[in-house]
Structures are given as structure tokens and as C-alpha cells.
């Protein structure tokens, strides 16, 4: 008879995001992972497989969670500018929180694996297209409702907004001054005017 898991697999993925976010994929050793996850080595292998498998599971969990949040903001009725602003300030709030910030940095570690890992590259490519489409549809709505000018290239703007959102983790890694994040977002949001 198989034993039931004695840990919450979602909680373990969040712990993995913090460990990989702090040390990066390459810098995360098995002992660091075991300590950070709080589970036995065999449980790690039995549940997630290899270090790479756990990393990919954690990255997908993180990205899917964040993408769902972004899309939910963008699909809400009301002001598009306010919805997009909320998307960016949600990221800033996470990056200003010491615990959530550690999870966010898994993004950098994952992006650095793209040139070497086709599964991660394909996952990011798919997610980027999904988010750009969500931003695009939201910007179309903004144009239809007269909230932004019709002269704007909304396809390019959708790509810019999405990539700017990703860039916030880099900004947070390069500066601990929260004003730098606020200024960055202020400039990004000014493209909607």
C-alpha cells in the first residue's frame, strides 16, 4: 500500500521558488534544496523527480499563477489604465515584500535557462504570446472606449507592457531603492497617455 504524502505539494513548490530564486538554478545544490523544502531526499525524488523536474514544476507554477492574476486584472470591467496600473503595482508590491521577492527571482533563473532548455523556452514563448494577447485585447477595448488614442500601435504597446512587467525583477535585483521601481512603473504607464 502506497503511503500518502505528508506534505503539501503546492507549499513545497512555493518553497522551491524561494530556493531557486535565491541561489539560481545552477547555484542550488541538493542539500540546499532539501533544507529549503523541508522534505526528505527520497520524497523529493518520488514526488518531483530530478532537480530539473522540480525547477520546471516550480517555474510553471509561478508563471501560471502570475499570468492568471494579470489576465484577471485585464479582463475586469472599468478603466483599462487602472487595470494595467494594478498589474504593475501588484508586481511592485511583491518585489517590495522580502518573502515574495525571493519567489519572484525564480523568473531570472528560469530566463537564464532558456538558451539551454527547450522545454523552458517553449513554455515562456507560449506564456508570452498568451499575455501579449491579453494586453492587446485590453488595449483594443481602451481604444474602443476612448481611453487611449487610436494612433497608438497597440500591438507594439502590448509587447512593451508585457516585457516591462518582466523587467521589474531585473530592476529589483539591481536596486534596493523602492523609488526606482515606482519611477520605472510611472514611466511605463505614461506610454498609455
Image (tube, rainbow, N blue to C red):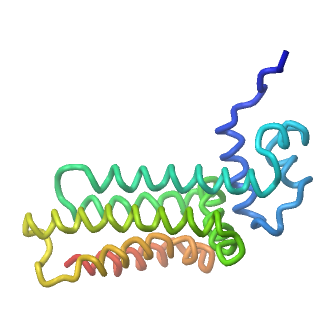
* Rendered position, 153 above or below 38: below
Question: What residue lies at 57% left-to-right and 66% top-to-bottom?
Answer: 122
Instruction: Give how far across and how far down residue 162 sits, in percent.
Output: 40, 71
Q: Which quadrant of the structure image shows residue 52?
A: bottom right
* Rendered position, 101 above or below 36: below
Residue 68 located left or right of residue 12: left
In depth, the one of 191 and 152 nearer the eye is: 152
Q: Which quadrant of the structure image shows residue 184?
A: bottom left
Quadrant in which the C terminus is drawn: bottom left
Residue 59 located left or right of residue 181: right
In depth, the one of 116 and 137 nearer the eye is: 116
Quadrant in which the N terminus is drawn: top right
* Rendered position, 37 above or below 63: above
Instruction: Give how far across and how far down residue 167 sits, in percent.
Output: 50, 76
In depth, the one of 154 and 104 nearer the eye is: 154
Residue 33 located left or right of residue 90: right
Instruction: Give how far across and how far down residue 41 sits, in percent.
Output: 90, 42
Question: What residue lies at 77% left-to-right and 26% top-to-bottom?
Answer: 5
Instruction: Give how far across and how far down residue 125 sits, in percent.
Output: 51, 68
**Number of numbered discs on residues:** 0
Q: Which quadrant of the structure image shows residue 79?
A: bottom left
Question: What residue lies at 34% left-to-right and 81% top-to-bottom?
Answer: 187
Question: What residue lies at 22% left-to-right and 82% top-to-bottom?
Answer: 153
Amino acid at each position: 500500500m502506497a503511503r500518502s504524502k505528508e506534505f503539501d505539494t503546492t507549499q513545497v513548490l512555493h518553497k522551491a521558488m524561494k530556493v531557486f530564486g535565491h541561489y539560481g538554478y545552477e547555484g542550488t545544490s541538493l542539500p540546499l534544496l532539501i533544507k529549503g523544502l523541508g522534505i526528505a531526499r527520497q520524497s523529493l525524488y518520488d514526488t518531483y523527480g530530478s532537480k530539473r523536474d522540480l525547477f520546471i514544476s516550480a517555474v510553471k507554477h509561478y508563471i501560471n499563477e502570475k499570468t492568471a492574476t494579470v489576465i484577471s486584472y485585464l479582463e475586469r470591467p472599468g478603466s483599462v489604465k487602472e487595470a494595467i496600473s494594478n498589474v504593475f503595482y501588484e508586481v511592485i508590491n511583491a518585489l517590495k515584500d522580502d518573502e515574495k521577492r525571493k519567489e519572484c527571482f525564480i523568473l531570472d533563473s528560469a530566463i537564464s535557462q532558456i538558451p539551454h532548455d527547450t522545454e523552458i523556452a517553449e513554455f515562456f514563448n507560449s506564456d508570452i504570446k498568451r499575455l501579449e494577447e491579453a494586453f492587446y485585447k485590453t488595449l483594443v477595448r481602451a481604444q474602443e472606449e476612448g481611453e487611449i488614442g487610436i494612433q497608438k500601435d497597440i500591438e507594439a504597446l502590448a509587447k512593451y507592457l508585457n516585457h516591462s512587467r518582466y523587467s521589474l525583477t531585473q530592476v529589483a535585483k539591481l536596486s534596493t531603492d523602492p523609488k526606482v521601481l515606482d519611477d520605472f512603473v510611472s514611466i511605463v504607464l505614461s506610454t498609455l497617455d
